Image: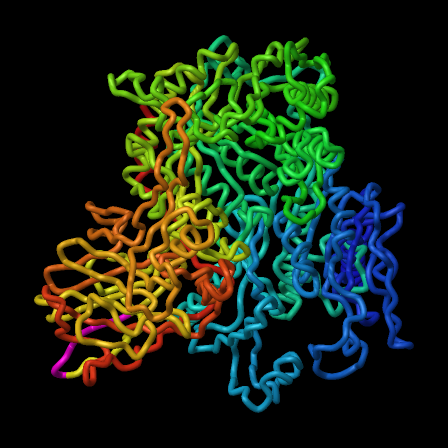
Amino acid sequence: MKRIYIGIIAILILVITPIAWWYLSDEKPLNVAILDKTVPNETYREHLGVNWFLNHYKYTIDHQPYDVQKNYYGTIPNDKTKRVSEKKFPTDYSNYDVIYLADTYGVYKDDLNEKKRLGKRSEKIVGGLEMDEWQSIVGRLASNKKSMLIAEYNTFASPTSEAVRKELQDYLGISWSGWIGRYFDELDYHKNSEIPQWVIDEHGDNWPYKGGGFLLFNEITEKLIVLELDKHVKTEGIQVQFTEEGKKFFNTSARADYGYWFDIITPKYAEDALANYKWDLTKEGEKLLEDNDIPQQFAAIVSQDKRYTTSYYFAGDFNDMSRVPTLYKIKGLPTIYKYAEKYADSSFYWSIYIPVMHKIFDTFEQKEVQENVNHDKLNYNARTKGESFEVLRDGKWESLVFKGVNIGMGKPGAFPGEAAITEEEYYRWFRQIGEMNANTIRVYTLHPPGFYRALAKYNEENPDKPLYVLHGVWINEEGLVDSLDAYDEATLKDFQLEMKRMVDVIHGNTYVKPVAGHASGLYDVDVSKYVIGWVLGIEWYPHMVVGTNEKHANIGEYNGTYFETKNASPFEHWLAEQMDLITTYEKDKYNWIRPMSFTNWVTTDLLDHPSEPSEDEDLVGVNPNVIYTKSEMQAPGQFASYHVYPYYPDFFNFDQKYLNYKDFRGNKNSYAGYLKELHEAHNMPVLIAEFGIPAARGMTHENVYGWNQGHMSEQQQGETLQHLYEDIMHEGLLGGLVFTWQDEWFKRTWNTMDYDDPNRRPFWSNAQTNEQQFGVLSFDRFKVKVDGDTKEWTGTQMYNTTPSDSTDFAVDYDERYLYFKIKSDVLEKASPRILLDVVPNQGNTSATSIKDMTFSNGVDFMVELNKSGDSRVVIDEYYDFYDYFYGHTLNMIPPRMAVPTKNSGKFAPINYVLNKQLFLPEQNITTDFSAYETGKLLQGNANPKAKDYNSLVDYTWTDENVIELRIPWLLIQSKDPSQREFMGDLYKDGKEASTKVDNIYIGAVFVDKDGKVVKSLPETKNHVLPALSAYSWEKWQTPKSEERLKQSYYILQKLFKD
């Protein structure tokens, strides 16, 4: 009996001790806002798991346990009425420490009907995270009071808008292309009621799948992929496994099967993934994922730790539980369930979710927020000193010679105002810029939050070799041009708000609401210690400067807190006023100041240029010398910033003083001559904030030394940049910033802007517009390398080969070129003439250069290829835009056709204008209208990996009788190849003439040295070339691209190292 009592007592102790221990432990007051819009019924399963966790670990709200029915925001169910109401998300989270986004998918009409199978698509009642709801959350996360955000699967997917999704993903540090997935033990929906109803509705009897497997669905494109067990995956299900970072953080190597829906996401930085999903793919499964751009490895838990806040994203319904224990007031209960339910569906909750949450909340409680800047004393990290520039490093001032690049907002497929560059791209670029031995980047305007986060990350990883930033503040150029007045109320108000916003941005202390054409999001990373100067404004429109000076002639001098003027014009007064405003705002709010400058260019420099033929290019000057620093700003000082290119304005080619100046090499050099005079004219140090040369096929301006704006190879680009930078340094300037880092497909230039569709420029790469190709980073993928090696070809065979004729004639395309391959023994004795019929109801049905033949098609272009190298593309004279525009419309040149005539049989060289007539005031002469033949083709090797690579090469002709050719889309007058748009009938519809085609028609004629036809594709019949074969291509909205560092990058890398 005694033993029985002892046993009973022991059991009671075992039972009572963990309960007593729970009651004796301290409660933890913590206000957690649980947000759940997906509560169709009173199971509350979408936030049941987090509610149990909070109560078990004694987290309380108002000293009370969390009530699963009351302590959340979102949809409120009523099982009796089969309706839901809504408890709106808070508009103010200032009283909450943690925000838990459990689910925002919502409730739909069909969800309220009890049925065996869920997932029918029906009308939404409540659902999706709204922008104002997200902005309220951001308001809390952006505060300087510590906070934590935890989000789960389906907080940014459908029906949340793309704008909110982008901001949320950006904040969480993840990328998601729309894919979600789930493993099912049985894919046959007749046997498995878990298969969603929408699968049946869309596929019905055409659903062939049985056995285990994954459903992968893209919520953006609505594409469905099935991975079948044994065929695509070797084992059942998917597991969550901790990464090395996760093992260290959570102090566990636990893993568990996960059985519900998951997102396929990737972290911006691999080290942010604390856990990944693990599945066992077959080779066929890997191929299927690769074909659909789905990553084979993807994250399950992603974390980002910031100064004031920490975020976690769970890429699954981790807290979703159909039931939890009624009892929770027992210490150690999760451990019991971990082992008791090891093989149950709830195993994941006990073995992964609960330990993860325990560690997350424990870490949050212990987190201490520390200010990293002393706001009690004035801070500045850079200064001008005499003719030099210095930065403060480790408490010591060090001289800095500017070696850097400008970074714009462009990337393929997006206009700059879309702020589409991702944090991962910025980080990768910063690494490459650092490896190029640059020390400074300049930006013109506000970039998305990822820019500042990536900058901070890169610089924290490279403290001995950081990238400094010269930050610009953009002003509405259209407003200035329209008003011709810098004091225009609307334009000035926006500019001054933007200056203040930019100060808050670099200090990581603002949220910028979405506005069309402007970057936005939460700016919560302080990069102020890396920003070593402001460069305000844009290249000033000279007539606006004149207008401001005239309208405010009596404004007088400016005398502000930190800047004043002496003998200043009204526009210079305006500049000093803006410089004073941004300095005062930053000083008052953050106790920071930094060196000051404003954008200027040769057009509005302080020098006189009597040899300049264009009045607008020397109309008015803006003089930095008349602006002086005052008070504390005398310590960091100011510097002048100029954009200086060697080919424009035109006086660089005509000013005898500059042309006769000899540089440090002993060579005549107008660029160096100008730099010398510019330097001598200033009482402050001068930075060349932009200088550059495009590596492009198309050309816009010529330079007397061959430093042209265009028709320069990547090698020539690099050599010229080196030459210009050496000039900058030897003339005593602060250094130079190359324009620009990356190619910018959205750009235009004056001599091709009338050829293309301005609304579609970012969607293809225009080899003829040099303004797009100033970068040292290319995005062109060069689908065909044009080197004579045809192994890579996957294009379309235009004509069938026969045993007696094995001529291989194929065509392919990408975002930049139309490619051709010809492989034939006939090339031993004849040269091809490739015929292109690109638009209907036009073109020549004969050519004077091809004897005794007529064409069934109207041929618009002919590519004349010769092994000797004298090759070109020629155009039907009626279709020639150059002749139409400058000859018939503007009357600047004698037109080739006095009377525009269709089907004249005449083809003409393709020319682009370089300069209209110029009157040279010093010489008192007028130069001729000038142009160059852009249709002329260059022979060589266009493979970037080849030793003899030349980026200007158009075709190669090998001794093995192989020709590879690439033709820029604009050269054949495609206004937008992504939509198969070409110029139309110019003389009928004007210069905006446009037509969209389903096909273009292609053939070839081979002629001997006497012009006699020896072969044709298709084969002639009675001297008539039959209908040409049609060629088409898929339209595209999202262009494909591949990053590649140009040859110029490596030249700069060596230059900046020395």
Q: Position of residue 381 (x, y in %)?
A: 57, 18
Is the residue 875 above or below the residue 215 in the image? Answer: above
Q: Residue furthest front?
A: 898
Is the residue 464 above or below the residue 845 in the image? Answer: above
| Front-most of residues 396 and 819 | 819
Q: Position of residue 439 (x, y in %)?
A: 44, 27
Q: Residue furthest bottom?
A: 205
Q: Position of residue 604 (x, y in %)?
A: 53, 25
Q: Position of residue 254 (x, y in %)?
A: 55, 56
Magenta portion: prevailing SS class: loop
Q: Residue at x 21, y 68 (%)?
A: 822
Task: Look at the image and give the residue range highlighted in magenta.
Answer: 803-810
| Front-most of residues 46 and 545 | 545
Q: Residue 646 lies in what quarter of the image?
A: top left
Q: Residue at x 34, y 20 (%)?
A: 656
Membership of 808 in magenta stretch: yes
Q: Residue at x 83, y 57 (%)?
A: 73
Q: Residue 965 lies in what quarter of the image?
A: bottom left
Q: Is residue 763 visible?
A: yes
Q: Is residue 3 visible?
A: no
Membership of 223 in magenta stretch: no
287 displayed left or right of 442: left
Q: Residue furthest right?
A: 81
Q: How many marks?
A: 0
Q: Residue 257 lies in what quarter of the image?
A: bottom right
